[in-house]
Image: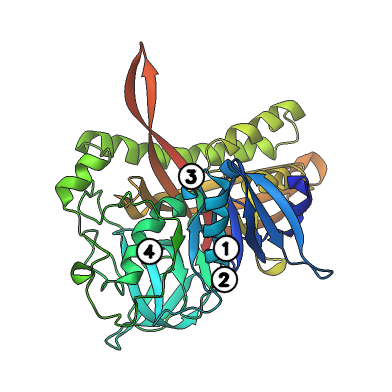
Amino acid sequence: MKHLLPVILLFFVSERSLAQEAIYFANGDKLPNARLADATEDKVVLSVKRDNGPSTYSFQRSNVLMAFNAAGDFLVISTLPADAASARQQIEQFSTAKTSNRQSDFLVKAVPFTVIPATISYESEQVINYKTLQGTAASINKDELVMVLRKDGRHQLIMAPTDVVSLLPTIRQQVLAGGAPEPVSTVAKTEPTVPVAATGTSETVVSGPKPNTSETANVPAVVVVVNTGQQASDPSTPAVNSPVSTPVTAVAVAKARPTLSDSEYESYRVKALQRVDEFSGYLNVITNKSIPLDRRDQAIEQAVRLFMPTATIEVTSTNRPGSRRYPIREYLTRLKLLPYSRTNIEWSEIQYIRELTQAADGNYYGTITGQQTFTGYGGPGGRNVLYSDVTQKNVRVKLQSYEKTVNGEGQLNWQVLLGNIGVANN
């Protein structure tokens, strides 16, 4: 029953894909068509559907984040009892659910954190059009979402699994309560209310707001088996009236998580812009064949460290229709091997289209846009332009806190990480 992890990684798909039964791992990977089968004191056993029948694999509990069953319910692995018998009982209860009881679709918005009950009418790679419970047509860009829960039990993660898992207890409570209408954001923006073709540039550029501490807190409830559909028969019931959801005041939120002062906010806001510029600098080192190979490989390692572990980048080409998405390291390696003697990659007009705003998990999220000009040179002396394009790209930015021990005392620090890079328009 023991199999190596790299063997089944071949079957992983993007975290953006739709699925029902699925397992998510601590490294951000996803295993579709998989279910929890058993547990020991330190491991969980997974059953994966194959053409020739189910196969089983065992993993350390710490390596597995969460599971989704056929009904679209989810289970957080870290909350399973240490006792193997109790864990098996809960896994069996979780695995028997087959049909979703949700009364609507749910859009989980990141900032401000909101679970929006809806009926999805259209979806593209960048946007979801939907109707509210009151029948009003609306639209939202996917990069504003944490995840999507569909009425039929399907789910779609937009943020990385490692970011989503900490929000599941709060998501569960609000889904059971029927969700809540989308509140008015404190950040000025423009959102379409009718079906539109998404370009990723619908946000209005605004000056940096003060850190937001008023959104819903991430309630630290211990949730083992989560059924997101049992009590959603009346989706219009506000969360405040539900016995399963107790609102937390902004004061409690501020005490539960660190926040930035105004001066810190402005400092890290600038640092995030500098990270994008730094990434652009590494690109030109990686693609320059006159630079020694070991220095170019070092630039790849330095560039990778700027990003979240599961970050991807979307690329397009004037010579090929459509777009493709690659993990950051794979993209940089491909870039190094391009058949140009040298390239020039410039990012200009770098600015925020969504300011850094604190989400329910305590981290700050924002989106930076920039115009990337790519030029590949070849021929005698590398002076001839062989390829050139200009692409507007949006970069997800995450600011997360961590504690560092200095002279035996804990000090709070913040780290700026880049996330997924998507194509806004060409």
Spatial separation of the CA atoms under disc 1 and disc 2: 6 Å
Q: What is the number of the mark on residue 418?
A: 3
- Which residue: 32% across, 64% down? 173
How many marks are shown on the rendered structure?
Answer: 4
Q: Secondary structure at mark 4?
A: helix
Tell which circle, 3 or 2, labels the residue nearer the N-terminal end.
Answer: 2
The front one of 5 and 198 is 5
Within 10 Å of the Cα at label 4, are there few (<14), some (14-19), or many (20+) other Cα atoms?
many
- Reading the image, the residue beneath label 2 is 96
- Reading the image, the residue beneath label 1 is 92
Within 10 Å of the Cα at label 1, are there few (<14), some (14-19), or many (20+) other Cα atoms?
some
Tell which circle, 1 or 4, labels the residue nearer the N-terminal end.
Answer: 1
> Residue 11 vs residue 272: left or right?
right
Q: Amino acid at mark 3?
A: Leu
The answer to the question of whether label 1 and label 2 lie on touching residues, with beta carbons closer than 8 A, is yes
The front one of 265 and 44 is 44
Check the image and name the residue furthest to the front: 85
Whole-percent x and y of residue 312?
59, 52
Tell which circle, 3 or 1, labels the residue nearer the N-terminal end.
Answer: 1
Spatial separation of the CA atoms under disc 3 and disc 2: 39 Å
Whole-percent x and y of residue 363?
36, 45
Query: Relative to 65, is 49 above or below?
Result: below
Within 10 Å of the Cα at label 2, are there few (<14), some (14-19), or many (20+) other Cα atoms?
few
> Residue 57 vs residue 244: left or right?
right
Q: Secondary structure at mark 1?
A: helix
Spatial separation of the CA atoms under disc 4 and disc 3: 28 Å
